[in-house]
Amino acid sequence: MDLEAVRTFVAVADTGQFQAAGDTLAITQQAVSKRVATLERDLGARLFIRGAKGVRLSVDGQAFLPHARELLRVEDRAAASVQPTRRALRVDVLNRRIAPAGLLQAFHQQHPEIDLDVITLPVLGHGDEALAAVATGTVDLTFRALAATAGRPPARLRAGPVLHDRHQLLVGPRHPLADHRQLTLADLVDHPIWMFPMPADSEPGMYYRELADIFGLTIDVVDPNFGNEALLDEIAESHRLATLIGQGSRYLWPTSYDLRRIPIVRPTPIFPLHAVWADQNTHPALPRLLDYLRGHCQSQPSDEDLWLPSWISAAEPTPHT
């Protein structure tokens, strides 16, 4: 169906005259007549009854009018969904279970009037899909560790530190470490850590490889990957299996599993995340999100013993640039 013809039909219905509809749409009266005639032919129905003083809707026209208005509303919403200044603020949170998703949810609770489009894009390494989408304006903001650029934003992008997500060990009640209140990385050397497969050149892949190499950890890949729920099932029953999760990660499991999240200290390994956006981004809600993130930037205490990957300095993070 020709939506311009539908728009013309609605204009005629609203004004009651072909000439007035043409003035509203900035087209000639002849163009209005042609569009309406084409629409009537396509629908196989007469939409207007012509008279000396103008036109009025026929019975079919009255039936079609509310649907015509809805078609135009849908068209407007469809266009708005891809126009940066009209669509919802589009934010990539990496994974809906981890800390960035929780941070964005808190922002939404504080600013419910801002429409959000929450997406998850893969972390692929040097050809990162999310960074490319941010650079082109398809995505307004993402969270990344910026491993490939030593913590600095790539060309044409800006970044600021947001999250230092501390890692914890997740174990079941039968695991030898289950009753510890705290653990060191040295305590984990003789205990395998399960992780899902990840590309070696991805940010998580680089992080866990460096962590394992420096502290002598054994990281076993869960293959095939049946998802988080299956992993939690296995850990709950196991005498030897454990995994690492972020402090800000959200998982649900039955209380009967009795899983334990145990902090790792001296040092605490943390996965650093930056908010990344394009300098030329014009979405009207982006400055408000950036202000919120600046106010909630998680900086580590100077006296806390932390381990960060080699591409990030352990110094106090700089403000958003």
Image: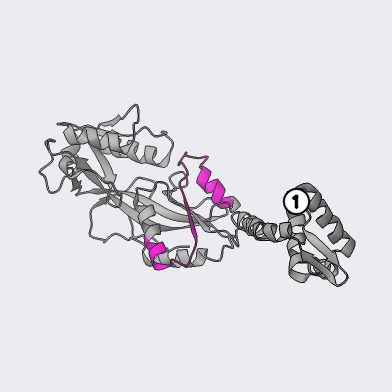
Please state the total of marks drawn on the protein image: 1
**In which quadrant of the rendered view does residue 309 lie?**
top left
| Location of residue 176 (image quadrant) | top left
Q: Quadrant of residue 300?
A: bottom left
The residue that disc 1 covers is 2
* Magenta-colored span: 106-135
62 or 129: nearer the viewer = 62
In this rendering, position of residue 213 left or right of residue 127: left
The residue drawn where x is 23% and y is 53% is 305
Q: Residue at x 72, y 56 (%)?
A: 60
Residue closest to the far bottom: 53
Residue 103, position as x, y percentages in the image: 37, 58
Q: Is residue 217 visible?
A: no
Question: Residue at image x 60%, y 62%?
Answer: 85
Q: What colour-coding does the image apply?
A: one colour
From the viewer's perspective, tell me whether residue 56 is left or right of residue 297: right
Report x, y in % for residue 16. 79, 69
Q: Is residue 24 left or right of residue 68?
A: right
Res 98 visible: yes
Is 99 inside the magenta-drawn segment?
A: no
Q: Depth check: 252 or 124 in front? A: 252
Please state the horizontal and vertical placement of residue 222, each as a whole percent of the image: 31, 30
Q: Is residue 230 above or below residue 145?
A: above
Looking at the picture, tell me which residue is in the foreground, 83 or 7: 7
Q: Residue furthest front?
A: 59
Mark 1: which secondary structure?
loop
Residue 282 screen position, x and y as percent: 59, 63
Residue 255 vertical placement versus 284 (above, below) = above
Q: Give the amino acid type for the residue marked by disc 1 in the picture.
A: Asp
